Amino acid sequence: MNLREFFWKLQRISPLAWGIILILLALLLVKVDGDFAKKLAILPTVIAIFLLYQAIFRGKMY
């Protein structure tokens, strides 16, 4: 599988699935010791909130 096909498959994942994946990533970062990891968990959380909003309230679950 080449790189272009891999990125195409990543684009086909629904925003709802991306939101859940990013929430899980943020939860893993919060579990890591250190202040930097906790600050780093803010970014996936914010993006996940926007994706979940788009998927649930805007009806873009495809």
Image (cartoon, grey):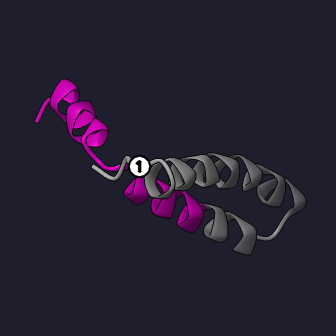
Residue 48 locus on image (x, y percent): 58, 53
The quarter of the picture where residue 10 lies is top left
Residue 49 locus on image (x, y percent): 63, 54
Residue 13 locus on image (x, y percent): 29, 48
Which residue corresponds to the image point at 71% horizontal and 46% vertical from the top-left? Answer: 43
Q: Amino acid at mark 1?
A: Pro
Location of mark 1 (residue): 15
Which residue corresponds to the image point at 30% horizontal and 36% vertical from the top-left? Answer: 11
Which residue corresponds to the image point at 89% horizontal and 60% vertical from the top-left? Answer: 35
Q: Is residue 24 above or below residue 46?
A: below
Mainly helix, strand or loop, the magenta region? helix
Depth check: 31 or 62 in front? 62
On screen, residue 29 versus residue 48, left or right, reads right
On screen, residue 15 versus residue 28, left or right, reads left
The quarter of the picture where residue 5 lies is top left
Depth check: 26 or 19 in front? 19
On screen, residue 4 versus residue 28, left or right, reads left
Region of the chain picked out in magenta, as a range? 1-25
- Name the image quarter holding the N terminus: top left
The residue most toward the left is 1
Q: Is residue 8 magenta?
A: yes
How many C-alpha atoms fall within 10 Å of the one at disc 1: few (<14), some, or many (≥20)? many
Which residue corresponds to the image point at 48% horizontal and 64% vertical from the top-left? Answer: 20
The residue most toward the right is 35
